[in-house]
Amino acid sequence: DAKTTQPNSMESNEEEPVHLPCNHSTISGTDYIHWYRQLPSQGPEYVIHGLTSNVNNRMASLAIAEDRKSSTLILHRATLRDAAVYYCILRDVEGGADGLTFGKGTHLIIQP
Amino acid sequence: DTEVTQTPKHLVMGMTNKKSLKCEQHMGHRAMYWYKQKAKKPPELMFVYSYEKLSINESVPSRFSPECPNSSLLNLHLHALQPEDSALYLCASSQEGWTEQFFGPGTRLTVL
């Protein structure tokens, strides 16, 4: 999987939007951008994924740059439950069952 | 049923013991995975099974032996482990190799 770069940590206030950036300058044309998060003492949890267009689901939105070299995960209204480590991972749709390569991720802290 | 279950939740074993970790999913997923996560580190891929066949072994020592008896079940047999093998062992499954992965809560393993 191609490499991604994320800030080590970010802090936000409860009920405010959060924008989590991810840089992936070496992304290839068949790489999907996946986001997972891991809450304390739990296994990772899938959040969202996209290829070129912006994506929305019940958990978050994914904004993808036009050149696809960066993306932003948007939590529209953060709650304390959103405090977690967020991982941005590139997945090659032609890669088959090759597992996930986790980077260090962004530790999101939510202040009440 | 959209969850991955893992048993036991916690396991303490001596270096001469033999034990097994169990993972089960009933979502009809054809790919299953074992990951290892040390404290404050991201998960690291160990093994991938695709259609019940081992497709990836990330150079894991032979004291870890995976087994996939059927499409719903994944085991990890442990023998002669070292204290540095103490970690959270996570199981995951996915419909296909590149689709989103569903993780279990993990087994917290302590080797004395």
Image (tube, coloured by chain):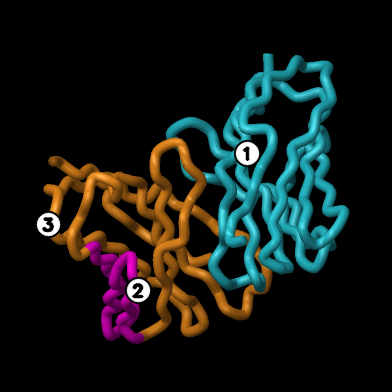
Chain colours: A orange, B cyan
Mark toward the viewer: 3 or 1: 3
Say the numbered circle drawn on residue A16: 3
Q: Whole-percent x and y of residue A3?
A: 44, 62
The N terminus of chain B is located in which quarter? bottom right
Bin the neighbour count of mark 2 within 10 Å (Cα to Cα): few under 14, some 14-19, many 20 and up. Answer: few
Identified by mark 3, the residue type is Glu
Identified by mark 2, the residue type is Asn
Mark toward the viewer: 2 or 1: 2
When the figure is inspected, residue A106 is found, relative to residue B55, above or below; the finding is above
Bin the neighbour count of mark 1 within 10 Å (Cα to Cα): few under 14, some 14-19, many 20 and up. Answer: many
In the image, residue A28 lies in the stretch drawn in magenta: no
**SS class, disc 2:** loop
Q: Whole-percent x and y of residue A106?
A: 31, 49
Point 31% across, 63% down: residue: A22
Q: Marks 3 and 1: same chain?
A: no
**SS class, disc 3:** loop
Q: Could you tell me which chain the residue with mark 3 belongs to?
A: A
Point 32% across, 77% down: residue: A56
- Sequence-earlier tag: 2 or 3: 3
What residue would you read off at disc 2? A57
When the figure is inspected, residue B109 is found, relative to residue A15, above or below; the finding is above
Please give the range of residues in magenta: A53-75
Determine whether, in the image, residue A25 is placed left or right of residue B111: left
Mark 3–mark 1 distance (CA, rounded to whole Å): 34 Å
Q: Whole-percent x and y of residue B80?
A: 81, 23
In the image, residue A67 lies in the stretch drawn in magenta: yes
What residue would you read off at disc 1? B89
Mark 2–mark 1 distance (CA, rounded to whole Å): 29 Å
Marks counted in the figure total 3
Q: Marks 2 and 1: same chain?
A: no
